Image: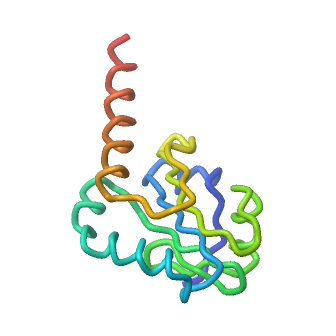
Amino acid sequence: MTIGISHSEPAQATKHTLLYVFSPSRQERLYQLQMDTLANKQLALDDHHVVIAEVFEHEGGHVGPKKIRIESSTGLRREYHISPGQFKVVLVGKDSAVKLCAESCVSCEEVFMRVENELAHKAESRFL
């Protein structure tokens, strides 16, 4: 299945936190390191409702098991201001706000901390 996606797409934005991994290609060393780090923590990512979106410069990527069309990859790169040849990791919360933006690999612990912080703020705002 192939999809077009944007962080502002309401159904996707409210169901999951999206961890975008932008890379020029699958052969990029930073991309490979980031994906190795994430692969070791897939169950914990699932528990935190984090879906990984791999977005490439000249080829389609995917969000979880769903493929992203190349046109959508180009649009996402533009939306998040990803320059040609640039590697970047962007965490987008369930509220569609950017929670983390890094030009190098991020640890799963950093992702979990940001997700848990978002949940704590959401719970806190319900009591105010």
Q: Residue at 53% x, 63% y: name it.
A: 20
Q: Is residue 97 placed above or below 85 in the rendered structure?
A: above
User: Foreground: 127 or 106?
Assistant: 106
- Quadrant into which the C terminus falls: top left
User: Which corner quadrant of the image does residue 72 belong to?
Assistant: bottom right
Total marks placed:
0
Q: Residue at 56% x, 81% y: name it.
A: 67
As drawn, the residue found furthest toward the top would be: 128
User: Foreground: 118 or 29?
Assistant: 29
Q: Is residue 1 placed above or below 77 in the rendered structure?
A: below
Residue 107: x and y in percent read 35, 58
Residue 117: x and y in percent read 35, 35
User: Which corner quadrant of the image does residue 125 belong to?
Assistant: top left
Q: Residue at 23% x, 61% y: name it.
A: 44
Report the coloring of the rendering.
rainbow
Question: From the viewer's perspective, is 98 left or right of 19?
Answer: right
Q: Is residue 12 placed above or below 5 in the rendered structure?
A: above
Q: Residue at 65% x, 79% y: name it.
A: 24
User: Foreground: 114 or 14?
Assistant: 114
Residue 103: x and y in percent read 57, 59
Residue 21: x and y in percent read 53, 67
Question: From the viewer's perspective, is 102 left or right of 24?
Answer: left
- Quadrant into which the N terminus falls: bottom right
